[in-house]
Image (cartoon, rainbow, N blue to C red):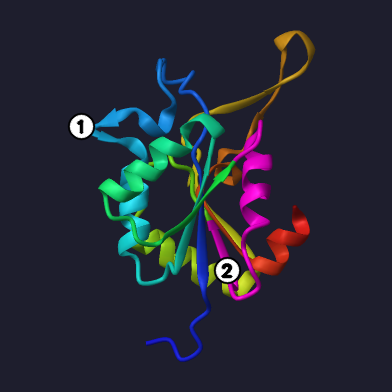
């Protein structure tokens, strides 16, 4: 048990089309195993003992869908559904404005990333407490080239130092609020 448990809020940006996936529906609503993609992350956040509250950023026309989804799946930790902005930055910013000072840690996890685990949540919170912020990332395995104008290759980058950023991205509240 943690003696001085810090309160953690999760922000779930839930907008955008799956253009890279070739989808005709918004990514959070795409089905995976017969379930909307967003329900996977929300289920893990709901079960996590480390998450105290969840705020979803939704496009205005989708807030009714999210209210129904939260009700149908009994996501009791979802405290608010906030209208997001035109960009992910604006959506997260709108959610951060709803986070009061009782929360110490802010975890941001994209709705379209279904493979969130409790271990990822816990490790990111521990890291954010210690370092101020951290992100989940995957080491790059492919050879990566840096190209200049006209697509001419300038050099091969050292892939041992390259990571693909993922979520969760977790921060002490004061740091992420100041950054935004």
Above or below 169: residue 7: below
Q: Are marks 2 and 1 in contact (CB under 8 Å)?
A: no
Question: At x 65% / y 56%, what residue is drawn?
Answer: 96
Question: At x 65% / y 73%, what residue is drawn?
Answer: 101
Please provide percent x and percent y for residue 131.
Answer: 63, 70
Q: Which residue extends farthest top?
A: 150
Question: At x 62% / y 47%, what residue is drawn?
Answer: 92
Label 2 environment density (alpha carbons within 10 Å; few <14, some 14–19, many ≥20) = many
Give yes or no for residue 89 being in the magenta stretch: yes
Question: At x 60% / y 40%, what residue is drawn?
Answer: 84
Check the picture and name the quadrant holding the N terminus: bottom left
Please provide percent x and percent y for residue 167.
Answer: 50, 48
Above or below 119: residue 104: below
Give yes or no for residue 170 being in the magenta stretch: no
Q: Nearer the viewer, residue 165 or 97?
A: 97
Q: Which mark is residue 50?
A: none
Q: Nearer the viewer, residue 126 or 152?
A: 126
Q: Which mark is residue 34?
A: 1
Q: Which mark is residue 105?
A: 2
Q: Is residue 46 left or right of residue 123?
A: left
Residues in magenta?
84-107
Q: Is residue 16 left or right of residue 95?
A: left
Toward which corner of the image does residue 113 lie, by quadrant?
top left
**If you read the primary sequence from the N terminus, does the residue marked by circle 2 or circle 1 appear first?**
1
């Amino acid at each position: 048990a943690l003696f001085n448990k810090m309160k953690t809020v999760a922000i779930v940006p839930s907008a955008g089309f799956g253009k890279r996936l070739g989808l005709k529906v918004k990514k959070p609503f795409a089905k995976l195993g017969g379930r909307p993609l967003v329900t996977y992350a929300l289920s893990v956040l709901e079960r996590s003992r480390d998450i105290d509250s969840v705020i979803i950023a939704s496009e205005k026309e989708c807030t009714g869908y999210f209210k129904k989804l939260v009700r149908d799946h009994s996501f009791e930790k979802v405290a608010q559904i906030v209208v997001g902005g035109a960009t992910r930055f604006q959506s997260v910013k709108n959610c951060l404005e709803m986070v009061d000072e009782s929360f110490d840690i802010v975890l941001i996890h994209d709705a379209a990333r279904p493979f969130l685990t409790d271990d990822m949540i816990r490790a990111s919170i521990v890291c954010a407490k210690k370092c101020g912020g951290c992100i989940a990332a995957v080491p790059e395995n492919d050879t990566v080239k840096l190209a200049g104008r006209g697509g001419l290759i300038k050099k091969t980058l050292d892939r041992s130092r390259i990571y693909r950023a993922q979520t969760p991205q977790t921060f002490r509240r004061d740091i992420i609020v100041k950054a935004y």
